[in-house]
Image: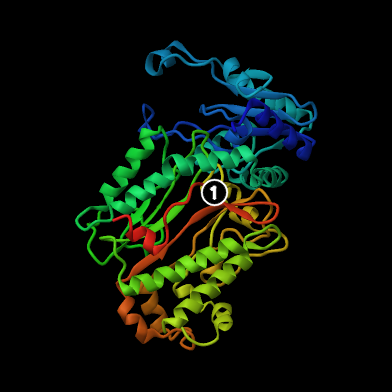
Amino acid sequence: MNITIKDYRQRRNILTKNIAKGIILFPANQVLPRNYAANSLPFRQDSTFLYYTGINVPDLFLVIDCQSDVTILAGHEPTIEDAIWSGPQKSLNVIAESSGIEQVLPVGRLKDKINNYQAEGRKIHYLPPYTSGRNNFLSELLNIPQQSIIGEASEELIRAVIDQRSVKSDSEITEIESALDLVTGPMHRTAMKMAIEGNYEYQVVAEMYKLAKANDLEFAFPVICSVHGEVLHNESHRNKLQKGQLLVVDAGVESMNHYASDITRTTPVGGRFSAQQREIYEIVLNTQENAIKRLQPGIRYLDVHSEAARDITRGLKMLGLMRGDINGAVDAGAHALFFPHGLGHMLGLDVHDMEDLGENRVGYDEHTSRSKQFGTAYLRLAKALQPGYVVTVEPGIYFVPALIEQWREQKKHTEFINYPALKKYMQFGGIRIEDNVAITGSGCNLLGNPIVKTSDEIEALF
């Protein structure tokens, strides 16, 4: 099921009906230099621009007149220099036609066009910029001081885009599943099999990257591949794998149309869990499977997160690492010593979908406010789920020596945490298990072909 020109037109039509008045302006991303213009960073298109156009070309502008439904693509026509350095380029008209856009405009005339709209009293709706270059360009184009650009972004447009992009169509879910099945699943199975003593983390990442590039795809985010899984966003890959360690791999690729996948698996180096590792692993796996079973429309993700925290606390209590009343421990935030992050986030054209528009706007609403409690405060998605949402479910248990020592010295939550018992876990590392799930009208669907995750399945790979 492909995303078509009709889909992009329909998305724009829905947006103009929701905004009704004014002009919508969506800038494409620019090619950014590493240190000079001809030595550039890899180009990644702005996700909202992709959502409404499907055009993966830099330095363009989408202009939508909400009253007349006229859509304009502004940009540069290719020059002979472009052809010399980059090969034959498509004309602006051809690019516009590929998305069903009616009109084109030389970018040099865009400012005059915007000035005319402003002279007519038309409101220019734009999203908050997330780069300094875009901030500066919008300031010049709209005659707004640079320090005011973010504050004057259109709240109406932000809300409309979030509401629309949050609910994934069947074709969007197909895109995510294609990324999962074509590369992300095989990539993780490869990484698991490479969890062998003597390999380096960077060798594991290299094999994963080889699979992505062999299918002309890119990573959706910097790969986490580390025997120090207790460092949540550990992007260093220089450690040599040693027996007794756990290798946490958090990675995914983008589909051809740039929809992200995001999977985490944890593998014992050498292919055999120790008794201690298996006990913690089973708690995390049970927590994740229970969380997925709880997903359905209308339920707050905050409540699913809280139940996951109780599952973790219950499991750790059975091991003697936590104690006391389970609900009291979670209400007090004692579980966050071991589970210091949120259960998951939205997934789509961004791995943390639309968070450039504001995490609180995407993950929270007027009925659900962000907790100030350590751990739960990092929950990116808390509001009630709706059919069409795609979310990650990624509980974990981590033993962070610095955090354990700090809490122990502060005598924090001593009624719930058995600090003497933690001495045997100070070098444990961490375990996280993550899958991607679509919310349906009656429950949820686990996306993609199953990727091995039970302890027995993982050991059977070796």
For residue 407, above or below residue 433: below
Q: Is residue 446 visible?
A: yes
Q: Residue at x 36, y 26 (%)?
A: 38
Please name the residue that numbered disc 1 is placed on.
447
Q: Secondary structure at mark 1?
A: loop
Give the quarter of the figure containing the N terminus. top right
Q: Nearer the viewer, residue 12 or 73?
A: 12
Amino acid at dot 1: Leu
| Left or right: 169, with 192 as reference point | right
What's the coloring here? Answer: rainbow
Percent position (x, y) of residue 54?
58, 30
Q: Residue at x 43, y 34 (%)?
A: 32
Percent position (x, y) of residue 161?
67, 43
Percent position (x, y) of residue 109?
63, 20
Q: In the current view of this chain or complex, which residue is farthest to the left?
A: 198
| Left or right: 409, with 443 as reference point | left
Q: Is residue 135 visible?
A: no
